[in-house]
Amino acid sequence: METYYDLAIIGGGTGGYTAAIRAAKKGLKVLLIEKDKLGGTCLHKGCIPTKTLLECSSLFNKVNSFAKDWGIEIEGSPKISVEKLMERKEGVIHQLYQGIQYLMKKNKIRVEFGFGKIAKHDGTDFFVQVRKEKEVLEFKTSKVIIATGSKPAFPSQLELVRNKVVTSDQMLDMDYIPSSVAILGGGVIGVEFATLFHELGSKVKIIEQQNRLLPFEDEDISKEMERIMKKKKIELLLDSTVNLEGLKILDTGVQIPVIRSGNSEVKVEADLLLVAVGRTNNIKDIGLEQLGIDISQGFVPVNEFLETTTKGLYAIGDITGSYQLAHVAAHQGIIAVDHMIKSEVHPYQPLSVPRCVYSHPQVASIGFTEQEAVQKGLELKVGKFPFKGIGRALTLGNSDGFVKIICDAKTDQIIGVHIIGTDATELIGEAALGMLLQATAWEVSLTIHPHPTLNEIFGEATLAVEGQEING
Ligand code: FAD
């Protein structure tokens, strides 16, 4: 059996399998090592299952909230079958999983299942091992990409308890809808699950230690999200931490001691506690320390072409300490491969990454927040336009939110776009293209946006930068 490869990739998630396809299409002989299932977190425990479930909860919510007012009479009250919900989620995952397996075969990528690590580097080649149940395989390779992803961070003081104390991994395999859920963490995962359970009928509380939800977003976005969540009766305990040692498992659920600002303690009870406090990277015991790579900060340091301090060794995706997003992992995989084959390549630019939250309303942003831009000492022009001035938003029955465009006042160039509202994650594509092409607000305002579409909000928000908006 062949044991020499041009490229070995450890980890077959979004980053790893994308890099494998890119490399194979560029003529490299590729080995892909995966310890579990191809597709990784995004396909099995992340993007795809959450978005499939959110689509179901959104439909359920629309039927419950609007159907009657929109003239649709439904006999009896709509009910959720958790079994069917899960069946649909598994169906979507399965279809995409088959697609990845097909692409590996089509591109003649050798896939080995087992735990991968770098055993040795002789200055020129790398020796990688695949530990399987009954044997250890060894391969020689010219280049290596590490794409081992991350897992839910979980405080050592807590223990996972089925249906009571869980992370997003267990939440995606639920077999019942809790009547109440407390979520520890008001970041992306916390806010998405808050939407999901609220729409499925659970009472939801979010406990966040910072003084706002989505703390890395523009402050205006956090404020609007908090306003909308409160309107939906999702309870927000901001500026609050949990006394983890004091958590009690009850017959009926959990009792959570929450320390509010000012040090007062409240006991929050819920059927279930979802711990959504970030992710820990899978970077230990895969041979990085022996190569002198510094992983003491919890991520693998790389340059703008994703190469580590060891020449020929690349790292991509969640483990690189940049945005933990599937499209970042895939994009970085392509850059790494193009760099190793000395193809023309653009470096990785975090400022060009669209960041998406699939809550309802959705949030999507790119570039600097207003606060970051001010901190950098930039002089700004800001345009803001609400969805309620956009006809299409009204036809869809949801006109909460706005688009905010931030420009450098000296050059007029767009340096940040922040959206909260219906289909924000679809709309951010235009902003991403505009920023890549270093467009000014005026240039984007010249784009003809079809009517009635949500995209029209870009025309309005870019005009608003000069106070020239039409419908607002
Ligand atoms: P992963 O996809 O995690 O893949 C890593 C792979 O490496 C895994 O298959 C793992 O089994 C394997 N592996 C690990 N160690 C080894 C080893 N030693 N040997 C062999 N194999 C190994 N991102 C978005 O862009 N949009 C979203 O909507 C979104 N939603 C999310 C929702 C949730 C609940 C979560 C948890 C994440 C979500 N993400 C989303 C983030 C996204 O899933 C990750 O950013 C993305 O999967 C990272 O890709 P990756 O290739 O770096 O790692």
Image (tube, grey):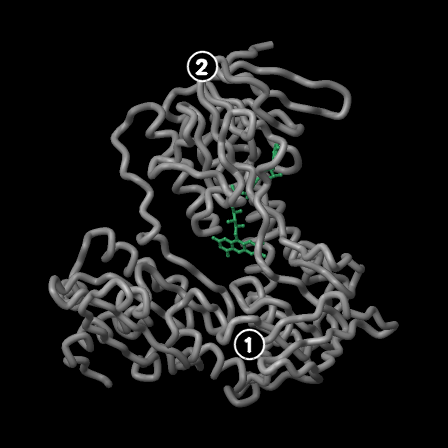
Image: 119 above or below 459: above
Image: 469 above or below 458: below
Give amino acid for label 1: Asp
Q: Residue furthest right?
A: 251
The N terminus, quarter of image: top right
Left of 348 or right of it: where is 333?
A: right
Kindly indicate the quadrant of the structure image that contains residue 470.
bottom left
Q: Residue furthest bottom?
A: 69
Nearer-the-camera pick, 369 or 100:
369
Query: Tag on residue 123?
Result: 2
Give amino acid for label 2: Gly
- Indicate yes or no: mark 2 CB to ligand 1 under 8 Å: no
Residue at 78%, 75% (x, y): give it.
255
Residue 332: x percent and y percent?
40, 40
Residue 107: x percent and y percent?
47, 26
Residue at 51%, 45% (x, y): give it.
297
Query: Tag on residue 438?
Result: none
Which comes before the other along the chain, label 1 or label 2?
A: 2
Identify residue for label 1.
Answer: 239
Residue 331: x percent and y percent?
39, 42
Q: Residue furthest front?
A: 263
Residue at 51%, 17% (x, y): give it.
121
Kindly indicate the quadrant of the structure image that contains residue 154.
bottom right
Q: Quadrant of ligand 1?
A: top right
Q: Is residue 234 visible?
A: no
